[in-house]
Image (cartoon, grey):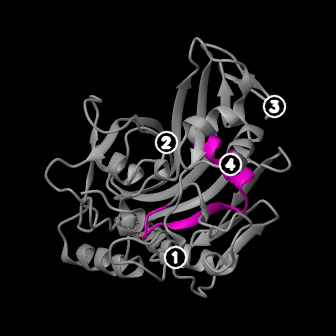
């Protein structure tokens, strides 16, 4: 049974839920016609304004080349489109005055810091009190009609992060920006850096995990890695070791793709699940000693960081309006920082103990 986006679990969405790719081949007998009119006749529920904005944003290619809105298509040409998807029925979206931690804003977009525990999009069990509910209130969506008489129907999300992941998200404020950002996410030119605290001591300081990610065949609310590429979707994560802390390691991850739970699944596949990740085996002692004092220490750190140790630290992209590269960075949140400091203290105490021997 198919469900509307609001009825789906918001923790199981990935970046591709926010945009779609389409391919159109022009018929051999096609008369020359403006590309916007041509596409309007072939695409359902897509307005001329949306098509024109996508063309201006470079999100519609003809024979792999960008074109202008007055371009006329010719027989046998190949058209590729990347369009933002409709994001639900606005009459069902409940605007709520939820405080937003906005780190950057202009006429085209804003970048917001999402704290851990805040769901991004309404879904099963979360019809309200999500980031989208807060953005709907901030943008006054669902309350103001646009000129064609329809409700303005989109909060400009083009990517997401899990409920218990903290960090930065970019939100488009108009259709042109939406198309421009969707194109960058589709072609994986967005720079996204995450910090993660993982169990164990990775063998290499630098590495790349190239393994498809898809639903677990038995546990349907989980995802798993398919290194042979026989199932799931292509997913690539680059990682770099930042700090080794005996039984845990702070790493930096850069995403090429935005699959559901990608970093969490890839690090588990590597044998280094995220610290305190209850879904992927990180909420128990994976590495360390058998002494009860160590167990008490780990349990204490679990209370300091009562969620998986993943933070979307920085975001970089070409600004739709200026054409310049915009880079934003954020500090580690207090819970993540407290856990990291606790492990650093553990390392120092071990060194002091060894020095006395």
Q: CA distance from mark 3 to mark 1?
A: 35 Å
Report the mark closest to the observer, 3 or 2: 3
Q: CA distance from mark 4 to mark 3?
A: 14 Å
Q: Secondary structure at mark 4?
A: helix
Q: Which mark is residue 50?
A: 4
Q: Residue at (65%, 18%) from the top-left corner?
A: 63
Q: Position of residue 102 (x, y in %)?
A: 70, 73
Q: Residue at (36%, 59%) from the top-left corner?
A: 12
Q: Residue at (57%, 82%) from the top-left corner?
A: 95
Decide which of 354, 230 is in the foreground and name it. Answer: 230
Asked if residue 5 lies left or right of residue 131, the reply is: left
Packing grade of label 1 (10 A; few <14, some 14-19, many >=20) is few
Q: Which residue is identified by label 3?
A: 70
Q: Which corner quadrant of the image does residue 297 belong to?
A: bottom left
> Of label 2 and label 1, which has the lower sequence position?
1
Report the mark closest to the observer, 2 or 4: 4
> Of label 4 and label 1, which has the lower sequence position?
4
| Image vertical order of residue 293 relative to residue 63, above or below | below
Question: How many numbered discs?
Answer: 4
Q: Which residue is identified by label 1?
A: 91
Q: CA distance from mark 2 to mark 1?
A: 32 Å
């Amino acid at each position: 049974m198919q469900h509307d986006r609001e009825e789906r679990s918001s923790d199981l969405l990935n970046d591709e839920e926010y945009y779609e790719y389409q391919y159109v081949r022009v018929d051999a007998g096609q008369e020359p016609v403006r590309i916007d009119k041509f596409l309007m006749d072939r695409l359902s529920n897509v307005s001329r304004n949306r098509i024109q904005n996508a063309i201006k944003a470079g999100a519609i290619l003809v024979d792999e080349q960008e074109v202008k809105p007055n371009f006329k298509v010719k027989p046998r040409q190949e058209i590729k489109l990347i369009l933002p998807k409709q994001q639900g029925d606005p009459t069902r979206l409940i605007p709520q005055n939820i405080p937003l931690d906005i780190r950057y804003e202009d006429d085209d977009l804003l970048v917001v810091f999402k704290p851990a525990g805040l769901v991004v999009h309404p879904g099963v069990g979360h019809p309200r009190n999500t980031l989208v509910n807060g953005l709907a209130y901030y943008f006054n969506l669902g309350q103001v009609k646009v000129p064609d008489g329809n409700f303005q129907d989109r909060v400009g999300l083009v990517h997401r992060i899990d409920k218990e992941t903290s960090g930065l998200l970019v939100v488009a404020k108009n259709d042109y920006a939406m198309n421009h950002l969707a194109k960058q996410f589709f072609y994986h030119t967005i720079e996204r850096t995450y910090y993660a605290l993982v169990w164990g001591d990775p063998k290499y300081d630098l590495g790349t995990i190239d393994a498809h990610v898809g639903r677990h065949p038995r546990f349907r609310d989980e995802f798993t890695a398919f290194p042979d590429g026989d199932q799931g979707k292509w997913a690539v994560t680059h990682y770099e070791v930042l700090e080794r802390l005996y039984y845990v390691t702070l790493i930096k991850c850069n995403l090429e793709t935005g699959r559901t739970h990608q970093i969490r699944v890839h690090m588990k596949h590597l044998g280094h699940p995220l610290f305190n990740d209850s879904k992927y085996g990180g909420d128990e002692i994976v590495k360390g000693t058998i002494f009860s004092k160590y167990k008490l220490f780990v349990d204490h750190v679990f209370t300091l960081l009562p969620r998986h140790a993943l933070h979307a630290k920085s975001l970089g992209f070409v600004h739709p309006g200026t054409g310049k590269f915009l880079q934003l960075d954020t500090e580690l949140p207090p819970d993540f920082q407290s856990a990291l400091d606790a492990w650093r203290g553990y390392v120092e105490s071990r060194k002091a103990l060894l020095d006395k021997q």
